Image: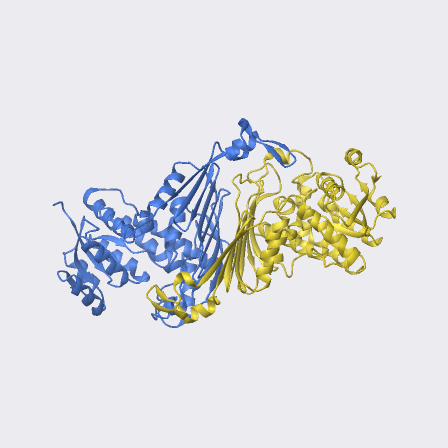
Chain colours: A yellow, B blue
Amino acid sequence: MSKKLKFGIIGCGNQGSAYASFIEDGLVPSMELVAICDIDSKQTDKLSQKYPAKEVFSDYKALIDSGLVEAIVTTVPHYLHPEIAMYAISKGVHVLNEKPAGVYTKQVKELNAFAAKHPDVTYAIMFNQRNNPLYQRIKQIVDNGEIGAIRRTNWIITTWYRPDAYYGQSEWRATWGAEGGGVLVNQAPHQLDLIQWIAGVPKAVYAKAAYGYKRDIAVEDEVTAVLDYGNGATGVFITATHDILGTDRLEIFGDKGKIIVEDSKKVTVKRLYKSEQEINAGIKASGTRFEFPDGKQPNEIAEEEVFTTDSVWGAQHSGVLENFARHILHGEPLLAPGADGIHGVRLANAIHLSSWLGKEVSLEDFDDDLYLSMLNEKIEEEGKYAPKP
Amino acid sequence: MSKKLKFGIIGCGNQGSAYASFIEDGLVPSMELVAICDIDSKQTDKLSQKYPAKEVFSDYKALIDSGLVEAIVTTVPHYLHPEIAMYAISKGVHVLNEKPAGVYTKQVKELNAFAAKHPDVTYAIMFNQRNNPLYQRIKQIVDNGEIGAIRRTNWIITTWYRPDAYYGQSEWRATWGAEGGGVLVNQAPHQLDLIQWIAGVPKAVYAKAAYGYKRDIAVEDEVTAVLDYGNGATGVFITATHDILGTDRLEIFGDKGKIIVEDSKKVTVKRLYKSEQEINAGIKASGTRFEFPDGKQPNEIAEEEVFTTDSVWGAQHSGVLENFARHILHGEPLLAPGADGIHGVRLANAIHLSSWLGKEVSLEDFDDDLYLSMLNEKIEEEGKYAPKP
């Protein structure tokens, strides 16, 4: 039997428990679960009943210091991700950070800088959607230049339906002090990562966010963001938790074609026979009647490919766990390096900040301190949690 | 035979000639074409050869003053619409104004105020898409409250493909001085009207417009606009002339359902069994598992209706002509009152202004003078035409 990575789960809520079962069910062959940790003993008790042979901790530092594990995952509330990740890295324990990397850019930058100083310790992030075959294929098509340079992206992702009863389940949910935001921080980080992973990091964003628009929460339940890629290309990103008939439609339009993804399942790729610039240059016009170059008829300028993929529940997450373990054990390239976590956090922060200021906000020169001070104002108004450092 | 409206066409280019043929071909039974006018005798000669028995004018005032016609249409360059319309109204001649009503709000407001002082003279506008059975049905569904109060609109309408060869056909095309804009003024006015006709007039707009982005023109060939309806509802409107694989997808999402229109042809209407507010209030949640009220399963909360309509070429325009004539002759309600033309012009102006200023612009307190002065700056930079009064 080949070597397995000794792994600890810090945070035994829904997500931590799911990862435990993936490992125990054999979906992560390069990993061995040896320790679990939660400040709430009810959570560790529940998990221990199911998987008795694990060491149990209530203090994450004790788990990390125990020498039992080579690596951990941080399935704890968002604000704590950087703190725990940095502690583990400082002890030479590899970290798979849960998404989002943190809540505000200042702390995530600190984490990234700290991790960069410890290149011998692996720092990865649970962007499980990067392990979705559909988005992997789309990234490949874009990276290969099959649709040319991107001119526009458009994602309506309003399938994150959450009723008031969902928010009412926990005191900390959808609060500024404990979650640091709403749909951008809890539901949409996957898409905030994917759109940047596939189409690149925007230079600036303008956003309208609606706070407690259709839900009894202080944080955002709807967002409309306009992305500026700095080279003429633009994008629109729309998400919400109150659309019970939610839409999931991604369109990426480039010089040489277009990709349309419906319901994160059906993909239509249209490839032009040559770039739009070349076609444009060769068209002859009479009024609004256009004669295409190379004797092409309108229906001959593009070829259409349609494919669908289904992603099995658990396969994405367990794939990221396995990739993380194989990276540490065998040097396999990391699917989601931890440093990439900054992009989603910065875009989410910038969307908040733009909506608060009512103007476009730079991502290149993002004002981390201004964001944190305004976030702390919201936390103080809310009056439930302490401001952040 | 019933009485017919004696009609004159001012401007015998593509559009004016098309209207002449609709009337002569019997598609507008309540109208009789008696006179045509163009400053270019080549245009009137061409039309006279086809339809010899018409009086021919080179001066629009002479046609209006002739006493031959009861009504006219203004199929002339956009900037001239208000001037000709006001002259006709002042002489008691009914006006069907071509879209857009004018180029800048200041002149269109003057026209509207002038027309309002002459309620005995009919002033209408050629919003032929309002005569498209598909959009009429959608307006009816919205007006009936079948999808409830609107929460969000989203129109990607990038099927207005125009190559450089199109723009190269005429000196005046896509100039600030002669057209006053690009896709917003020439191609998309229909959708700028429809979205407001169906979903209401926004209170403010933020826009990114790209000027000469993928075409060798001074005006905009791409627009991304975020609409704010002032009551929490928002919208996105995207149009462009450089997308050869253009998208036409309209989504209207409301408290009680959703309408999705694809290619201005296929309509999907989803109607919730009760409002989202009521469903939300009745949901029980366990984590992200939701139990719907009234014992409903997830697939039972909405009914879906799909329909398609085809609109025959010419039927829309001839229908507007006929409605205009029947309004004057028999008092039939006007499909498109001329005063409605201000909405599309103001939204187009506000999109320009927002993109120039880099900030959201109010439509309620739209600064007509600021817009005109900035438009005149563009005209002066261009150096081809005189600034506007």
At 53% from the left edge and 52% from the top edge, which residue is drawn?
A307
Residue B197 lies, with reference to residue B60, above or below; the image says: above
Can you give x and y, in whole percent of width and height, for residue A226 in the image? 54, 55
Which residue is at the far top?
B294
In-front residue for pair A186/A46: A46
* In front of the other: B118 or B270: B270
Image location of residue A167, percent across then percent down = 63, 36
Task: From this view, report whether residue A327 is shown above or below residue A59.
Answer: below
Is B290 placed left or right of B147 in the picture?
right
Q: Residue at x 12, y 60 (%)?
A: B53
Residue A30 image offset from top left, x and y in percent: 77, 50
Provide residue B388's location: percent of width, then percent of height.
35, 64
Residue A298 visible from this viewpoint: yes
Q: Would you say residue A353 is visible in this rendering?
A: no
- Considering every residue shown, the one lying at the far front of the view is A1
Q: Residue furthest bottom?
A: B383
In the displayed structure image, the side of residue A213 where residue B135 appears, left or right = left
